[in-house]
């Protein structure tokens, strides 16, 4: 099993534990679109309570990578809602899961495939 496959398995298990109902293919596509970030200790997780982290997700992932065209206030509201659902634990949540939930919410599956 490759290191990428190991990461995807870890995210799938975490998704199931949190009851997120995220498809394995969606998690894998999202993880792939995040590139090397999933292998970096400081980048693998998102501390949802940090405004800079939320801005990074909005600008770098949703707008730049996935091509989302929506106003910042709406995007920020959805990011906060998803972070609240996951829980804003001090240690953070997996970036791949936060982004997968955003991809599903905004129907961006084709953009990250």
Image: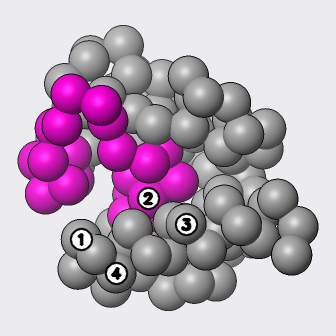
Q: Disc 1, disc 4: CB below 8 Å?
A: yes
Disc number placed over residue 18 in the picture, else none: 1
Q: Which mark is residue 97?
A: 2
Position above or below: 23 against 10: below
Q: Earlier in the sequence, mark 3 or mark 4?
A: 3
* Residue 28 pos. (x, y %): 67, 71
Q: Nearer the viewer, residue 85 or 57?
A: 85
Q: Which mark is residue 16?
A: 4
Looking at the rendered image, the disc whose residue lies closer to the viewer, 4 or 2, is 4
Residues in magenta?
81-102
Q: Quadrant of the N terminus?
A: bottom right
Q: Residue 37 at x, y = what percent?
A: 69, 35
Q: Residues within 10 Å of mark 1 (few under 14, many from 20)?
A: few
Residue at 16% of width from left, 38% of height from top?
Answer: 88
Asked if residue 18 is among those painted magenta in the image, a careful observer would answer no
Left or right of 21 in this view: 24: right
Of the pair 90 and 57, the residue shown nearer to us = 90
- Secondary structure under badge 2? helix
Residue 73: horizontal and vertical position, in percent?
21, 31
Q: Is residue 52 above or below residue 22?
A: above
């Amino acid at each position: 099993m490759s290191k990428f496959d190991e990461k995807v398995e870890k995210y799938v298990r975490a998704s199931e534990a949190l009851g997120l109902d995220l498809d394995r293919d969606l998690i894998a596509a999202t993880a792939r679109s995040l590139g090397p970030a999933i292998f970096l200790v400081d980048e693998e997780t998102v501390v949802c309570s940090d405004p800079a982290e939320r801005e990074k997700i909005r600008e770098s992932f949703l707008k730049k990578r996935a091509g989302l065209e929506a106003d910042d206030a709406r995007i920020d509201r959805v990011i906060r809602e998803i972070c609240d659902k996951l829980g804003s634990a001090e240690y953070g949540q997996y970036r791949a899961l936060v982004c997968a939930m955003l991809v599903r919410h905004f129907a961006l599956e084709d953009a990250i495939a």
